[in-house]
Image (cartoon, grey):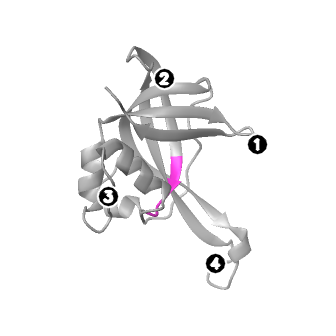
Amino acid sequence: MITSAASLFKSPTTGGGGKYESVKDGLYRGTLLRIEEGPTFFDTKAISDEFPQGKPQPKVRWTWNLSTPDSKPLDEEISELTSDATGEKSTAAKFFSAHMGKTFDNRATSLEEAVDSVIGQTVLLSVSTKTSGYRKVDVFPATN
């Protein structure tokens, strides 16, 4: 589990893929269970003496417990990866904003406060399969 939100969004590591093969495309309510370090990918277009494998691109894994749009619990979890960037145009900032119900500003809110405030929050999740075969999870503020 996470000990520091700052390290969560900055520490390169390796890891595995998400668990959601059985989740069908559709709209769900998702309660955020955890945010943790995900795998690190390497940009092979940025190979240099400093980065012989390519520049590291650390990822962060967001995991939700799913329920139906009308809040009936499902025995399923789904994860999505974002980069460790938290700038206003980043996917992580969009995820934080959806969970917080307001625009996330990484200059006004510490990452530790942001992580603490979103765990346990419920959002709407749109799950779809891209043409490449990979799943995509889009996150939207929940409506009651």
Tell me the kind of residue under disc 2.
Glu
Extreme residue toward the top, this view: 72
Position of 54 compared to 29: left or right? Answer: right
Point out residue 106 in the picture as x, y percentages from the top left corner.
Answer: 33, 64
> Whole-Å distance between the Cαs marked 2 and 1?
23 Å
Nearer to me, 2 or 84:
84
Front tag of 2 and 1: 1
Counting residues from the start of the chain, the first of labels 3 and 4 encountered is 3
Residue range corresponding to the magenta coloring? 81-85
Residue matched to label 1? 132
The answer to whether marks 2 and 3 mark residues whose Cβ atoms lie closer than 8 Å is no
Can residue 32 be seen by looking at this rendering? yes
Front tag of 4 and 2: 2
Q: Residue at x 48, y 60 (%)?
A: 90
Residue matched to label 3? 5
Nearer to me, 113 or 69:
69
Position of 138 compared to 21: left or right? Answer: left
Q: Residue at x 48, y 23 (%)?
A: 76
Position of 135 compared to 83: left or right? Answer: right
Front tag of 4 and 1: 1
Residue matched to label 4? 51
Disc marking residue 144 = none
Disc marking residue 76 = 2
